[in-house]
Image (tube, rainbow, N blue to C red):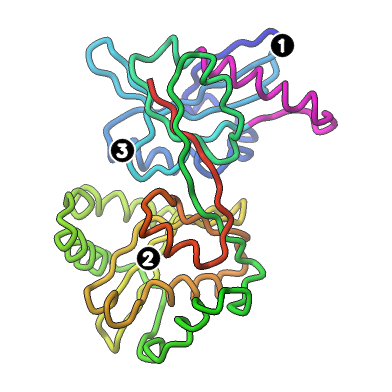
Amino acid sequence: MNYYLEKKHKNNLDNNLINKLSFWANPILMECYAKRDKSIFYYLVVYQDDIIVAVMPIFEKKKIFLKKAYTPLDYKYTPIDFFLKNDLDKFREQNYKLSIINEIAKYLKNNYFRIHIYLDPSINDIRAFNWAGLTVYTRYTYIKKIDDYTPDSLSRETKRLLNNKAKKELHIKEIWDIDIYMSLSEQMLKRKNRNLRQINSQFSVFLNDLYNKDLCTMYVAYKNDTPLLYLIILKDIIHKKIFAFFSALSDEGKKKYGASIYVYDYIFTNLKEYITLDFAGANINTVAYFKSQFNCDLINYYHIIK
């Protein structure tokens, strides 16, 4: 198979093609990250006989003559969108995709001094990246089907937590309040002795940018009028998916109320127009245990490094 790969700016992509791209390749979303990071992004378009067969978005940074392809912080996955014939049998589809990924892997290896990319979970064949001599690490996330969610499907232990009397003292609502984000994030980050990067003014601009473009929203758990927890989710309205993005809770929200479980239950119960929620990571043992109690599917994704 003869392939031709070309870098294209978003303005050089046909609108019909843009509309077919997956959520993480959405140019509106990518512009928010590029603006925050002062980086550039483009689309690596794979042609076969003048027909587009795949598109991969790439964030790029350059220092002198050295180029880096990377996944920005908090940008969860880099997708590869395939545009193949619908009538391919399994044998041809698998090998067709593999041959395309092989071309992409070689392109990345030959054109970048550094590579730091987290692939979308839909890319489960990473042999070509190994063949190109790149390093591949396995990562994990939990994905929960929520369009038919009912608490009855949960474990006995989780149902007992959801029925705790503390739940009656909380109320949850959807609201965009950057002050709540800043306050609870600062409390949590200082408590955990972590970097305060996500509470600087530039980061607030980034979040407001996402919200104003209808790419995210926030849910807050209150005790009376006191916010105890927020959870920001990213919204893929077209493909009916949501992604856990940022969350923080106060000491009281964690130790007295265990508020996190109630907010997720609220989202699962009230956002039935979406099909799945991706917890966006299951790589930290204590956090992974919390997420797993919702009877999720454990899914692999891959970290590509050079």
Per the image, the residue denoted by label 1 is 49
Three-letter residue code for mark 2: Leu
Instruction: Name which residue type carries label 3.
Output: Lys
Q: Earlier in the sequence, mark 2 or mark 1?
A: 1
Q: Where residue 178 sits: x, y (%)? A: 26, 64
Residue 245 visible? The answer is yes
Q: What distance separates the C-alpha of mark 3 from that of mark 2?
A: 23 Å
Rendered view: 236 above or below 80: below
Does 240 sit left or right of 291 as displayed? right
Point out which mark residue 174 bears: none
Check disc 1 and give the amino acid type: Asp
Count all numbered tags in the image, as a single digit.
3
Circles 1 and 3 in contact, beta carbons < 8 Å:
no
Q: Position of residue 239 (x, y in %)?
A: 62, 51
Magenta region, residue range: 82-106
For the residues marked 2 and 1, what is the alpha-carbon distance in whole angstroms? 46 Å
Tell me the SS state at disc 1.
Answer: loop
Disc number placed over residue 231 in the picture, else none = 2
